[in-house]
Image (cartoon, rainbow, N blue to C red):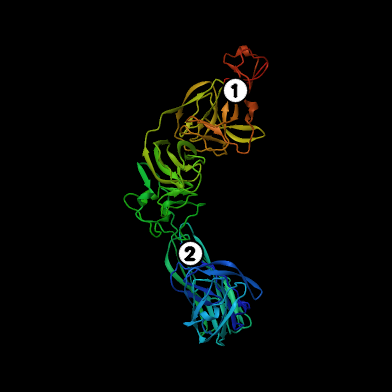
Amino acid sequence: MKKIFTFLTLALISIGTAWATDEVVVYYGGTQANSITVNDFTLTISGNTAKKWTNGNGTIAYGGQEYQTLKNSNGAQNTITCPTGRTATKIVFYAVANADAAGVLSEIDGESCEDAVSSLKDYKNPTVIEKDIANKNSFTFTFSTKQVCFIAVVTLADSTEPQISFSPKSIDLDLTPLTLEKSAKFTVTGKNLPDGTYDLIIPTVEGMTVAPTSFTVTDGAVSQEFTVTYTSAVDVEAASAIISAEISQEVHADIAVNYSCRSTAYTQTTVSEATTWNWEKLTAEVELSDATTPTNKETFVFANIEGVKGLAFNNDFTLEQARQIKMINTQFPSRNKKFQNGTISFTTTVPGTVVVDFSDTGSSVSATATPRYLLINGMYTQYWTSRPTEGSTKSNDRKTTEAIAVPAGEVVISSTQAVCIYSIKFTPAKAPASVTAKITDAGFATFASQYAVTLPEGIEAYYASAAADGKVTLSKIEGNTLPAATPVVLKGNAGEHPLAVATSTEQLAATNLLKGTIGECTPADEAYYTLAAGPVFKKSSGGKLAAGKAYLVVPASEAPELTISFESEVTGISEVKGASQQSAAVYSISGQRVALPSKGLYIQNGKKVILK
């Protein structure tokens, strides 16, 4: 990834008036780059590229401005090259140093200037060092390894020749399936030009635009910014277009816009056979650039990244396998050969099992922090990771799950907190004919299954649609098919009920406050509620939940229990003349069995009834 270096600059008189003065101020700061441009001067730094300037111990006042002092971590030779048509006649350094510094500015153009600065003791008061340059178009200066802040005032011999130039000289607009539009800015500057408005010469390239399309010269000068934008919905081979400006045949300049587009987004393919995705089997470390790096807010098919530098597929991890994987809000694997955070999904046409190799992220979270559970299709598994700590040494807690059953359709693998996923293995397996739901004597039970199931007559399924003011609202799922991975509250006759596994791939198109479990686990949610007799949801005091159950997450509530309100519950109340007409057990609204109920509202056969 390209590094970006920031340098502070100041023009003694606005550069917008383009060389209207013979003096230009260069304040040199920031992190060292090999070459930078400051006020149209090119500063080239030689030597070890690890050398850099860092903030010093104070500021210096110059020309009514405050500047941060700088510290040069290592000596380096600096070359300043003047703009085209300009030569330097004098350079003036305003240099400061710490009390222990001596020889801050070692030499200018090979001539020592140590004597001039050997007595520097106060960084608040600069020492002025002047040197005639004798009309050179470039000159060098060297610093020692001491703290320094310098403000160089370069006095120039101006040119009367008409000049025009672009900055930068070239722009790269390479598009990928993740970035199908890019923009970049460039500036046209000039001096000694005839006043007027001139059109840029813009080539005809499909998808490329420039704004504005003209520039205006006033008082012989111009300094105007432009934006070039490129977009494409089709693949385009690497090419270059030239944008130019011309005042006359002798006065012209141009900029090269290099562009290309790899827009073809691979279609995510389905899985029907045993498949293993192991990112540790990539043959090379991936080097990503600004144009190809997915952020952790993007969704992409893994194979769309094919062709980035360093990424290669092989017999252990093929391009076809890559096309089967989709990433959702997931960081891309580079040096570590793993996916971190977010979600990974694939779509299978047959039911089967998955085995996941994962660990914590290895960051500095306490070893006693909440365990990070693996989720399959949004449901808790019994597999989690923690961070063992031995003294000051922390290491990743790496786990490999047993086979976890998944239905046909989209398989989504995520976690309660950030984890690293190294590999996923899918194996086809026959789905069970049915799964069992056990409804309590009160006529209610929570239920969750990886598979879609058919609800038999007499059993209704409800999801938690809202919670407020100490109540939770349960809304009925219409029809007799319960979507896969949909935790619910079942209402019906007490006992064990086989629910036939269905082939439906439909999902619940509503917000559900219930969460489900695949294996026995302890939820990582700070506050959650479990179904108790009543029926009511009571705040849990901790402990493990059984597999195939559901629980309620209402973070904003602090109530010890939440009463249940059935949406359109009037339709669920039957009027009967007396308890003698009913043979099933009768329960109070609080969940207590009533042997001889009197008039009032009760629960019988999982339904509310009014006894008269």
* Front: mark 1 or 2: 2
Point out the tag, 1 or 2, that comes first from the N-terminus.
2
Distance between the alpha carbons at the discs numbered 1 and 2: 67 Å
Quadrant occupied by the C terminus: top right
Residue in front for this viewpoint, 6 or 599: 6
Residue extending furthest left?
A: 315
Per the image, the residue denoted by label 2 is 3
Image: 427 above or below 341:
above
Q: Residues within 10 Å of mark 1 (few under 14, many from 20)?
A: some
The three-letter amino acid code for the residue at tag 2 is Lys
Q: Position of residue 432 (x, y in %)?
A: 40, 30
Secondary structure type for disc 1: strand
Which quarter of the figure has residue 189?
bottom right
Viewer can see residue 202: no
Q: Position of residue 479 (x, y in %)?
A: 53, 31
Q: Residue at x 50, y 28 (%)?
A: 455
Residue in front for this viewpoint, 588 or 81: 81
Q: Residue at x 37, y 35 (%)?
A: 429
Viewer can see residue 3: yes
Per the image, the residue denoted by label 1 is 607
Q: Position of residue 173 (x, y in %)?
A: 48, 66
Q: Position of residue 237 (x, y in %)?
A: 41, 65
Image: 405 above or below 22:
above
Residue in front for this viewpoint, 271 or 36: 36
The three-letter amino acid code for the residue at tag 1 is Lys
Secondary structure type for disc 2: loop
